[in-house]
Structure formats: C-alpha cells, structure tokens
C-alpha cells in the first residue's frame, strides 16, 4: 500500500473512532406548559357573577378605602373587588356565597355616622368678676374635622414696589382676628373623644417698622383632647389674656343630634 493511501486509511479510522466515542447531543426539551387550572378554580370562576354595591352612608374616600381593605382581607383571595370613587360604589366578581358574605359585611360597615351638637361657652372674667359670656355652637359629624370662625380680617402690609411715574403699589395680607374653633369627634365604646383647638386673638397695639405701621396681634390658644358624655358639660381650660387682668374660661357641652 502506498504511503498516501495508508495515511488516508489511518485518518478515516481515527475519525470513525472519535464519532463513536462522542455522545450524541441532547435533544431540545419541549417548552414547559402552564399548569392547567385546578377543578376547584374552574368551578369558582364558572359560578362567579358581577355585583355592584353602592355606598349610601360613606362619603369620604378614606372611609371607602378602609371598607375595601376589609373586604379584601376577609373574602376569598380569588374574589375581585374594585372601588369606583366617581360612583361611590364597590364592584365585585365572585360566587354567590361570597357575594352574600360581602353584602352582610357592607350592611355592618356602611352605617350612617352620628351627628353631635357642640356648644362652647366662653366666660370672660376680670379678676374675680364675670364680665360676659359667649356661646358658640357647631354641628359635628364623627370622624370629620369641623371649624368655626368669628371675627375680623386685619390688613397687614407685606411689601411695596415702585410702579413708575411717581406711583407705588403696596401688597397686603389679611390676618384673622377673633375666635377660631376646630373640633374632631371620634366614637369609642365608652364615650366620645374630642380633639379640639380654641384660639382667641385681638389687636393689642401697633408698631412702626421701616416707616410702616403694623398691628400687634395678641393671641391665646387652647388645644387638647377630652372625653365627653352627652349632656354633661366639661371645662376645657382657662386662658389668661396677656397684659390684662382678664381670663377666659372655656367649657363645652355635647348633645346627640342623630
């Protein structure tokens, strides 16, 4: 055998042995398929219906959000619950038993809030002599902040600028002077909690700053939390009027309206 043929035979033999010793490449595995839904889930979705519940006594979005969270935590996790703020409604997709449970929950949560009448009595003393009494009344719904203001707006110059040709413009802001009340009621099992702020302000004097006469505002503020019982007055506190011998005693009386 010629050398060239011998070399060719040896090369073919080596290639054959290499092909036999090399493992065949793995066949590509088929793509994994999504697990089929369980029979229980299919029955759940097959019996689901859509129901809309309109909230009749809830007007604040925060309150509606709390109701929505309660429903999602108590109902089956597969139930779809949505809040439509523009319609003040809750839309559900669920089987009839979950719809019935949601309706029972909403009948307990969507209740009308109670309304109370708050009467502030301010008694003005000069030393030990009572010189006057004022009454301020407001209607408060539980869970909502209510304010009452009585007094005057005092202009205060905040700046000026030259508009040209011997004319100038002065800018003003206005301060509320008088009585300001803010109240928030929250119901508890054994009473009603009042978060209240009472502010009394008046003009004490005036001062000149950079050629501008500015008023000096005297102010007294009473802020705190109290627990009230309908029909029983509670003394919130007493304010001493600075620079005078006067003091202001503040009491409050709460009555249930509905």
Image (cartoon, rainbow, N blue to C red):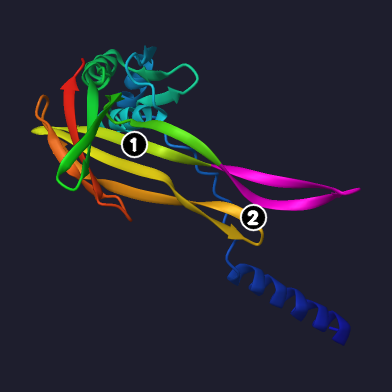
Query: Which of the 4 image quadrants contains residue 53?
Result: top left
Residue 228 screen position, x and y as percent: 14, 34
Residue 180 screen position, x and y as percent: 37, 37
Q: Residue at x 64, y 55 (%)?
A: 212
Q: Nearer the viewer, residue 114 or 17?
A: 114
Could one spot residue 135 in this view of the protein? yes
Crowd band around label 1 with a 10 angstrom C-alpha radius: few (<14), some (14–19), many (20+) = some
Residue 42 screen position, x and y as percent: 36, 22
Rendered-image quadrant of the N terminus? bottom right
Task: Identify the residue at the far right of this view.
Answer: 165
Query: Which of the 4 image quadrants contains residue 227?
Result: top left
Task: Identify the residue at the far bottom of this view.
Answer: 3
Q: Residue at x 60, y 53 (%)?
A: 213
Which SS type dominates the magenta stretch?
strand
Q: Which mark is residue 212?
A: 2
Q: Residue at x 47, y 23 (%)?
A: 85
Give the magenta range. Answer: 155-174
Q: Which residue is mark 1?
A: 182
Name the secondary structure under disc 2.
Answer: strand
Name the secondary structure under disc 1.
Answer: strand
Could one spot residue 2 in this view of the protein? no
Is residue 56 shown in magenta? Answer: no
Seen in the picture, residue 174 relative to 139 is either above or below; the reply is: below
Is residue 157 shown in magenta? Answer: yes
Q: Distance of mark 1 from mark 2, alpha carbons? A: 33 Å
Q: Nearer the viewer, residue 257 or 61?
A: 257
């Amino acid at each position: 055998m010629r050398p060239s043929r011998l070399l060719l035979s040896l090369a073919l033999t080596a290639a054959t042995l290499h092909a036999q010793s090399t493992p065949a490449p793995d066949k590509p595995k088929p793509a994994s398929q999504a697990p089929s839904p369980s029979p229980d889930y299919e029955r759940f979705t097959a019996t689901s219906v859509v129901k809309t519940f309109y909230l009749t006594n809830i007007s604040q979005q925060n309150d509606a959000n709390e109701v929505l969270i309660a429903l999602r935590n108590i109902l089956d996790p597969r139930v779809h619950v949505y809040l439509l703020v523009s319609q003040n409604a809750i839309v559900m997709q669920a089987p009839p038993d979950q719809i019935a449970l949601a309706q029972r929950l909403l009948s307990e949560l969507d209740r009308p809030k109670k309304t109370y009448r708050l009467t502030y009595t301010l008694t003005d003393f000069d030393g030990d002599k009572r010189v006057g009494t004022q009454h301020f009344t407001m209607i408060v719904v539980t869970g909502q902040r209510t304010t009452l203001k009585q007094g005057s707006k005092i202009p205060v110059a905040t700046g000026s600028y030259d508009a040209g040709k011997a004319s100038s413009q002065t800018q003003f802001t206005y301060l509320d002077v008088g009585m300001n009340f803010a109240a928030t009621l929250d119901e508890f099992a054994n009473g009603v909690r009042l978060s209240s702020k009472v502010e009394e302000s008046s003009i004490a004097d005036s001062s000149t700053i950079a050629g501008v006469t500015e008023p000096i505002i005297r102010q007294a503020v009473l802020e705190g939390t109290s627990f009230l019982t309908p029909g029983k007055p509670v003394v919130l506190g007493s304010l001493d009027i600075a620079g005078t011998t006067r003091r202001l005693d503040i009491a409050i009386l709460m009555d249930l309206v509905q």
